Amino acid sequence: MKPRGAIPELAPEEVAIVDADPGSEQRGIWYLAHLQDEVRSGKASSSENKRVVEAESYRLETTIAKNDRFTASAVVRLRAVTAGDRVIHFGLLPTLRVSQVAMAGKDVPFIQEDSRRDGDFYVVMPQAMTAGTQYELNIEYAGDKVVRKEGGGNFSVGAREEWYPSVNTFRDHAAYDLTFKVPKEYTLVSVGNLEKQWTEAGMACSHWISDQPVAVAGFNYGSFKKREVKDPQSGVTIEGYAAGEAPDYLRGAAQIGAMGSMSPSRLMEGTMVEAQNALRLYGAWFGKPPYSRIAITQQPEFNFGQSWPTLVYLPMMAYLDSTQRWQLFGRIQSRATEFVDEVTAHEVSHQWWGHEVGWETYHDQWLSEGFAFFSAGLYLQATGKDNRKYLDYWEHARQMLLEKNRFGRRANDAGPVWMGLRLGTPKNAGAYSAVVYRKGGYVLNMLRAIMYDTQQKDKPFIDMMHDFVEQHRNRNASTESFLAVVQKHMRPSMNAAGNGRIDWFFRQWVYGTAVPLYADFDGAIARLGLIRVRGNSTADHLSAKLPNKPRRVAVNLFHEMLEQ
């Protein structure tokens, strides 16, 4: 038990039972909870701030040599949260070795063991810190394995969040001032806004500054071609970066059958158009885009996407056309196509979910990943010629939640979405992804359904989402703070418990919810209203005047509810 938090990098809970045996199937967090008196008094909260320090700003100067050697200096300004602490834990890739730490011109001791043992980096302050006081540290470090050549001018940026000494990544919103020097034949694109470019001793140099506090900084790097367009509707400048050649691992495939040109830059315009459409859609549903620019960049990783503030990493798969995917995947290419159809929209939505609006603890990460999953579904519905892709998207999500794996376990049985990363176990390895992403998305989709109004359509839900973003701009949200916003926008259709509260939905969102009822008038779908159900019984009735006899009446036609 630690009063400051048993596992402070995850959450503020003070009591934990952990099996740390790396070879054990039982390895993991068995128990993590607040103190008993906090629970009994109602004071237990994810919003408890038990961090030792908070980051206020980073100034980083980085050089990547032709041999990929990484050399950097960091000026980190911190504010002490607690009084009496002397040790600060920084996130830093273990292969990056610190050579010096200084404060006010004087060396400060630090701890960094061999990278094969415990490569974590700690600074030991000369004196106990005073709560509320600012401290500025200068850190010099260098090493390798930050970037790796993949051939064809492609580089993997492996240390996405540990290429610089950081504290509370994704939790603290800080100012970033970033300078990079790289071989002049390559291009580096960073988070923030480009302030200046120049050439120095055969190196391409660039200076980037974040115009508002952000939760993490990163960059992409390679032999990129660039395109740029300013979207007049969203006001966002959209940049596209992609290599002219495929990475080495795909070069053999390029010779197969009709693979044709595998130049990623050939399809760069398509990903930029998808990003533009997503920005416009999400601007209407969630509020104006949080940043004035966004870079859509190609990376050599094949089926993995990621989003940093103003910087999106798209997988190589997104830069293959349908014929090339068929050549690579054959009959199973439909799943690859589904991924490609939604990956850009998913990652763009993280500009809102995860960056403009952060999350408090691992309990609340579904507010990022679940919301992004919902957003990608919204994109498929808005851009599809029909609802086929949209319905397939939610049906596939339902299957991943409810179908049993080879151990007879359903992902949904691992626990509630609030359990976050603790959902995954050796016999239910896919539970985290299925529950946090897909069930989290379903939660938002169901709220949209029960807030729907036949006259105002989705406006009540849209108003609630705008309010949620506005209340948490450049701040971290918790499940409780989201509940409070939903409660503020309570409507009669949401009052299933009859007490004017939405708590029932957050406690038991599958059973006792309102299910939409639709009528099909020869292909024209009309929403008739809502019917409350409890378990297998109808708890409500619905009367509606129809213009003529419908061809059919359907429940849950658009997968608004997660059903077994």
Image (cartoon, rainbow, N blue to C red):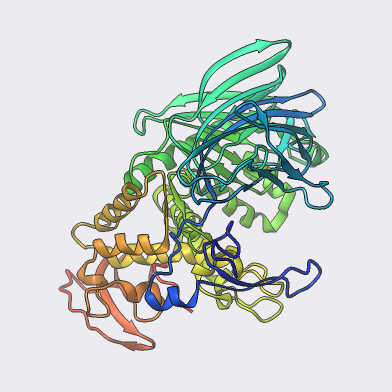
User: Which residue is drawn at the image coordinates 70% and 75% (left, top)?
Assistant: 427
448 displayed left or right of 265: left
Q: Is residue 224 above or below residue 299?
A: above
Q: What is the number of callouts on the image?
A: 0
- Horizontal relation, residue 250 to residue 54: left or right: right
Please tell me in which quadrant of the rendered image residue 312 appears.
top right
In the displayed image of the protein, which residue is found farthest to the front? 127
What x and y, as percent, mark residue 180?
64, 23
Q: Residue furthest bottom?
A: 537
Residue drawn 38% across the image and 88% down it: 536
Residue occupying image coordinates x 66% and y 73%: 428
Percent position of residue 393, x then y: 51, 60
Q: Nearer the viewer, residue 460 or 214?
A: 214
Observer-nearest residue: 505 or 269?
A: 505
Residue 156, position as x, y percentages in the image: 72, 38
Q: State whether residue 447 appears in this view.
A: yes
Depth order, front residue of 495/63: 63
- Please say if 219 is above or below 460: above
Instruction: Tell me, yes or no, if residue 508 can be seen here.
Output: no
Rendering quarter of residue 458: bottom left
* Residue at left offset 62%, top offset 57%: 335
Quarter containing the N terminus: bottom right
- Seen in the picture, residue 233 relative to 452 is either above or below; the reply is above
Q: Position of residue 117 (x, y in %)?
A: 83, 52
507 with respect to 490 (left or right): right
Q: Is residue 443 left or right of residue 399?
A: left
